[in-house]
Image: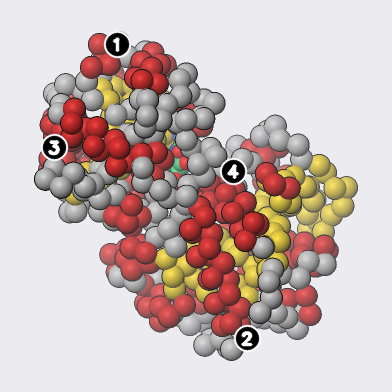
């Protein structure tokens, strides 16, 4: 077996260049952990306005690619930057598609031409490989935006020598976002019409780009074991549970790791004071600093401070929070939120800020620096998600000694163990049913333990010593790449 693998990593977002959620953290970190395991990697992502404005050195390569899109041939400009450790990141540029304020959608909804934008991007990924003469052992591609890649490899590019040995691994980070478009958009892809059927990329008379990834990739995975099981059920599968069950032999769950280079209170440059388990005094300084940042009264220093950092989307359980707002704020607590997303939640949190100005700090924006300050300065972190493929914030919270209260779903269930005062085991608080009373009960339980320093110290110790570093997950991905290669060699259940 070959020692080193050539991996093309195709992603719609990656830290530090452009991010809307956890996928960007994964795409920016995993390659750095695969490289020492013997992988030669290149990353490919769109050249968004956010990338232009990121301030990182990015070079215009002065060359372009000719990308077919429907009846047209469109030019893609090429740019080059790098991740740490010198991993090349190629950016696919076309201002008409990517020079916009947001990546996929505005607070009012999706961009109208997302099909054009990401079919173009997907095709450009393959043409870039050709242009660079980069023959990947594996194309590891992420989310609906790149879902068509294996459909292309099994059709238009099936005889291309460059991809002759290339296996595909498709990672689902969130199955609720599928890239569903009118069937007329199929013509943009250039794919043979035979692929448009219920066993292929058709989904109730529309095209579904995520389904393409699920049907045609050699191996599929999602970002926690629990979520890989949940999405095979109607409650969590968003209509794709049947096709996932069909491919369950090739479906894996690999928990995301955390990049402790970026998320570690002992060396976090965003914090006013740093701390570790041996000396937690810095955490108190961070709490003071956070209250100041939000203009909240210093008297809140002595009460439990709850934090939330989130996309403001239905998935995250804000309806449970909305149901218990008055009960929550009748308790002796503080609350800080950082998030952007749907307008209805902007309105909800606007109301909360007006009603409870002495207890609630609300920031409707995206701010990485403030996210770090919340992780350090809060005492507890709330994630009552309806579903959560992996969730990163609860894992960051653990490292910062900020105790998570979560609903037992997806990666939240895989990473958080409910605290048991008898054994002293557990790193957070967990409830099962999607029910605001259960959520409130866990909040009250947490406040009780907060008032008992022995228990609280145990919780902090358990949390801060939980280890979710990338090394382990990177090794699991390497094994998955090898399985995909085996699968590719052995033929595919869906044929070409
Ligand atoms: P998801 O991918 O569903 O949004 P995750 O928990 O996997 O959820 O990842 C969210 C990531 O995005 C975390 O790194 C979190 O800190 C970050 N994040 C979310 N909203 C904001 C925001 N408003 N400002 C800064 N960071 C944010």
Lower position in the chain sequence, tag 2 or tag 3: 3
Beta carbon at label 3 within 8 Å of ligand 1:
no
Q: Nearer the viewer, residue 186 or 120?
A: 120
Location of residue 175 (image quadrant)? bottom left
Location of residue 451 (image quadrant)? top left
Residue reaching furthest to the front: 278
The span from disc 1 to disc 2 (Cα, nearest Å) is 64 Å
As drawn, the label of residue 161 is none
Question: Is residue 466 shown left or right of residue 356?
Answer: right
Which residue is denoted by mark 2 in the rendering?
A: 489
Q: Which quarter shows the N terminus?
A: bottom right
Tag 1 and tag 2, C-beta contact below 8 Å: no
Beta carbon at label 1 within 8 Å of ligand 1:
no
As drawn, the label of residue 15 is 4
Question: Which of the two discs, 3 and 1, sits closer to the camera?
Answer: 3
The span from disc 2 to disc 3 (Cα, nearest Å) is 54 Å
Lower position in the chain sequence, tag 3 or tag 1: 1
Is residue 423 visible in the rendered structure shown here? Answer: yes
The residue shown at (17%, 54%) is 433
Which residue is denoted by mark 1 in the rendering?
A: 297
Which residue is denoted by mark 3 in the rendering?
A: 445
Disc 4 is placed on an element classified as: loop
The span from disc 1 to disc 4 (Cα, nearest Å) is 34 Å
């Amino acid at each position: 077996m070959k020692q080193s693998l050539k991996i093309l990593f195709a992603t719609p977002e990656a830290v530090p260049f452009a991010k809307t959620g956890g996928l960007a953290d994964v795409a920016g970190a995993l390659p750095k952990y695969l490289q020492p395991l013997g992988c030669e990697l290149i990353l490919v992502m769109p050249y968004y306005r956010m990338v232009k404005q990121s301030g990182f050195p990015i070079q215009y390569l002065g060359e372009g690619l000719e990308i077919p899109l429907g009846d047209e041939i469109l030019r893609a400009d090429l740019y080059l930057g790098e991740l740490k450790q010198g991993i090349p990141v190629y950016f696919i540029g076309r201002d008409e598609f990517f020079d916009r304020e947001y990546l996929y959608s505005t607070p009012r909804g999706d961009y109208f031409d997302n099909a054009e934008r990401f079919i173009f991007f997907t095709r450009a990924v393959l043409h870039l490989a050709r242009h660079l003469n980069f023959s990947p052992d594996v194309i590891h591609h992420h989310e609906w935006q790149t879902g068509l890649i294996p459909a292309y490899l099994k059709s238009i590019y099936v005889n291309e020598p460059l991809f002759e040995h290339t296996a595909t691994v498709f990672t689902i980070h969130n199955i609720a976002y599928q890239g569903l478009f009118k069937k007329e958009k199929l013509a943009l892809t250039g794919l043979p019409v035979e692929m448009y059927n219920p066993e292929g990329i058709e989904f109730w008379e529309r095209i579904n780009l995520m389904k393409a990834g699920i049907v045609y990739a050699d191996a599929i995975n999602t970002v926690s074991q629990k979520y890989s099981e949940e999405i095979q059920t109607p409650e969590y599968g968003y209509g794709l549970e049947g096709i996932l069950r069909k491919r369950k032999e090739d479906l894996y769950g690999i928990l995301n790791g955390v990049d402790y280079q970026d998320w570690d209170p002992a060396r976090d440059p965003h914090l006013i004071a740093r701390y570790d388990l041996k000396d937690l005094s810095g955490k108190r300084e961070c709490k003071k600093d956070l209250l100041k940042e939000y203009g909240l009264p210093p008297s809140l220093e002595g009460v439990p401070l709850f934090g939330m950092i989130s996309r403001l989307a239905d998935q995250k359980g804000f309806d449970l929070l909305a149901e218990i707002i008055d009960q929550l704020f009748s308790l002796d607590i503080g609350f800080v939120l950082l998030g952007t997303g749907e307008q209805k939640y902007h309105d909800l949190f606007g109301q909360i800020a007006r009603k409870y100005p002495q207890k609630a700090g609300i920031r409707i924006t995206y701010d990485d620096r403030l996210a770090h300050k919340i992780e350090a300065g809060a005492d507890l972190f709330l994630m009552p998600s309806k579903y959560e493929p992996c969730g990163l914030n609860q894992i960051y919270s653990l490292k910062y000694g900020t105790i998570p209260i979560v609903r037992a779903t997806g990666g939240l269930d895989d990473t958080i163990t409910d605290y048991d005062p008898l054994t002293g085991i557990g790193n957070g608080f967990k409830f099962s049913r999607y029910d605001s009373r259960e959520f409130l009960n866990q909040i009250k339980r947490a406040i009780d333990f907060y008032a008992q320093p022995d228990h609280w110290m145990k919780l902090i110790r358990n949390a801060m010593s939980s280890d979710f570093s990338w090394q382990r997950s990177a090794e699991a991905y390497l094994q998955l790449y090898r399985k995909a290669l085996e699968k590719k060699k052995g033929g595919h259940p869906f044929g070409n």
